[in-house]
Amino acid sequence: MAIKRVDHIAIVVEDLEKALEVYRDALGMSVTAIKEMPEQDVKMAFLPTGDSEIELLEPLSTESGIAKYLARRGEGLHHICLEVDDIAATLADLKAKGAQLIDETPKRGAYGQVAFIHPKGAHGVLIELVERD
């Protein structure tokens, strides 16, 4: 198992357009894409910075996981995403080492296969793993 880099840092926001007024307009970051993932009830904006990205997440409905997170914790850091070469092998290795996984098998994400490590097993931080397409 090898971590290639920090792929992105995800931030939950109530209003994507208002958040872009800070990240895009005030900070001057460029937006490379805005995507909706109806299956996850989320709208995302991607803003590259160096070898990583900031990912802004806005819930599409009040029933989504992101909306529930927002209601409990408010806006702010949601997760850190680490890029790996082989997500299936990484998950098998983590499982063998006793890591608390949310996903034991990868699922489709915005740019590849993803899986999450539970924050209870990562000192309070939700960690996403991604194998990019």
Image: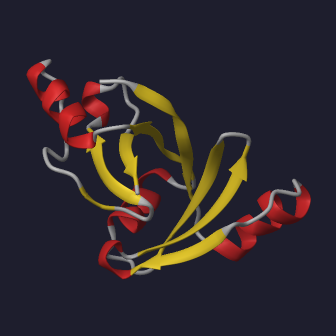
Which residue is the extreme one toward the top? 97
Image-based side of 61 in relation to 98, left or right: right
Q: Is residue 84 placed above or below 112 in the rendered structure?
A: above
Residue visible at 61% across and 74% down in the picture = 34
The answer to whether residue 15 is seen in the rendering is no
Residue 4 rendering spot, x and y as whole percentages: 47, 30
Asked if 129 appears above or below 1 in the picture, the reply is below
The picture quadrant where one finds residue 97 is top left
Which of the pair 89/65 is nearer the observer? 89
* Front in this rendered view, residue 46 or 74: 46
- Residue name at image x 63 percent, y 71 percent: 33
Q: Is residue 115 above or below residue 89?
A: below
Residue name at image x 32 percent, y 52 percent: 114
Residue 123 spot, x, y in % from top left: 36, 23
Left or right of residue 96: residue 106: right
List x then y, in percent, for residue 125: 40, 33
Residue 124: where, in percent of width, then height? 37, 30
Whether residue 35 is situated above or below residue 124 in the rendered picture: below
Q: How many marks?
A: 0
| Left or right of 44 on screen, residue 113 | left
Where is the C terminus found, in terms of image quarters? bottom left
Q: Nearer the viewer, residue 101 or 129?
A: 129
Q: Nearer the viewer, residue 50 or 34?
A: 50
